[in-house]
Amino acid sequence: MDSTQNTTDNVMSPAAANKWQKSDTMWMLGLYGTAVGAGVLFLPINAGVGGIIPLIIMMLLAFPMTFYAHRGLTRFVLSGKNPNGDITEVVEEHFGVGAGKIITLLYFFAIYPILLVYSVAITNTVESFITHQLHLTAPPRALLSLILIVGLMAIVKFGEHLIVKVMSILVYPFVGVLMLLSLYLIPNWQGAFFDTIHVSNNAGPGIWMTLWLAIPVMVFSFNHSPIISAFAVAKRQEYGDQVADKKTSKILAYAHIMMVLTVMFFVFSCVLSLSPADLAEAKAQNISILSYLANHFNTPVIAYLAPVIAFVAITKSFLGHYLGAREGFNGIVVKSLRQRGKHIAPDKLNTLTAIFMLVTTWLVATLNPSILGIIETLGGPVIACILFLMPMYAIHKVPAMRQYSGKISNIFVTFIGIIAISAIVYSLLG
């Protein structure tokens, strides 16, 4: 009760709330940082291999697909009665204790494996950079991964505000290098990729199959659902219930415009620099677009830039996903203790969570298991359900969200969610 009162007292005045604040910029860049990570380095291959027509359709779908889905999830978190309540508490409030436990568990196991993937990826990236670019002997993997994970967890230790601030700072060099690389490739643009129009016209069903299977790639290339709950709670505390929805929608819109423009320009620049055969070869080699470009054009600059971009991208995404994984883990612990009539202080719980994350991510980064890709893929349908379908279901079932019903965007989000889930399941079974 006290926390609710404090939140109300600290709410910004309506006049100030209508102005764009420094914190809004920080969160906008934090959202971008969580979404646009290492996955963008594989997007040109996965999105471009199907030809020009699916790529153009994906470009047109990118903004509405990401904006409406994340706005729906943000509104879902804002619909809870407790201003400090995160997504795990709002789920329990709307759907009951039993459903709350199940969804909280699924939420955690959808995000946590991605955190493990990033811990392995950042270790591999730095180890490869030391060995191949610096031509030095890398430290023992256990020591290297420990240094890197402890460094990331040191940022985490200083709290959510510093996490978002660091992420927002890292966005600048990342976007800068991404755009410079996109511009650097312009002299290599060729018309070979546009020949796929004729191939696609004769392929008929091939276009739709390519597009269907590419939707999940787009969804997860722009996905920042792990940070949405923390974002919604922070803005609700800052602006209050009356302004929070309008303000979060505006921040999300700007973040998504920035995502779509920068990422799609990078995708098109990479794709236009290569032939369809080159893209197919890159996909067969299962390497990032930067690694393939460095080999294809024999450019040492790209070879050096690739690991640096990957390091920054993975760091940003690790921090953003940590917030979501922490919420999920905290939710599981709180619900388990509540059932037994017990309580744990938030600071103590966050410390417990940090120790668990540190130990497990370090162990997995050291062991470097090959199963991680499978685990990450299995989490895909759960993330799609939470991001696309759960908020749309809540609009029809929860009185606090009934005000958002009757919109065409709701049908669109539900449709994209079903397509994404079906395509993921098809890929897994195939």
Image: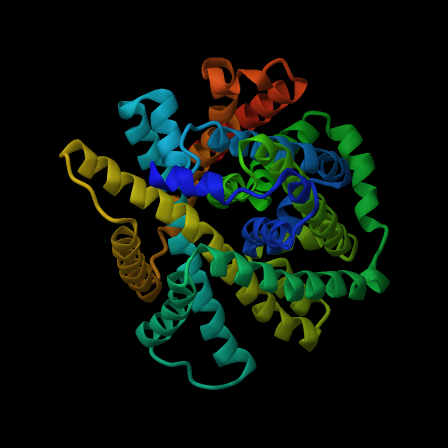
Instruction: Locate residue 312: give its quadrant.
Output: bottom right
Q: Position of residue 407 (x, y in %)?
A: 65, 17
Above or below: residue 101 compared with residue 136: above
- Drawn side of residue 427 relative to residue 345, left or right: right
Q: Quadrant of the N terminus?
A: top left
Residue at image coords 45%, 55%: 160
Asked if residue 316 is positioned above or below residue 48 in the image, the reply reads: below
Task: Identify the residue at image location x=42%, y=65%.
Answer: 152
Q: How many marks?
A: 0
Give the farthest residue toward the left: 340
Q: Is residue 349 above or below residue 127?
A: above
Q: How far across and down, in percent of the image, does residue 108 sit?
A: 35, 41
- Pick whichever, 173 or 404, lies toward us: 404
- Depicted 24 relative to depicted 182: above or below: above
By what rule are the colours in the image chosen? rainbow
Note whether residue 49 is visible: no
**Percent from the top left, x then y, of residue 256?**
67, 43
The spot of residue 417 in percent (x, y) is 54, 27
User: Is there any visible trace of residue 60 in the rendered image?
Assistant: yes
Residue for point 22% across, 46% down? 344
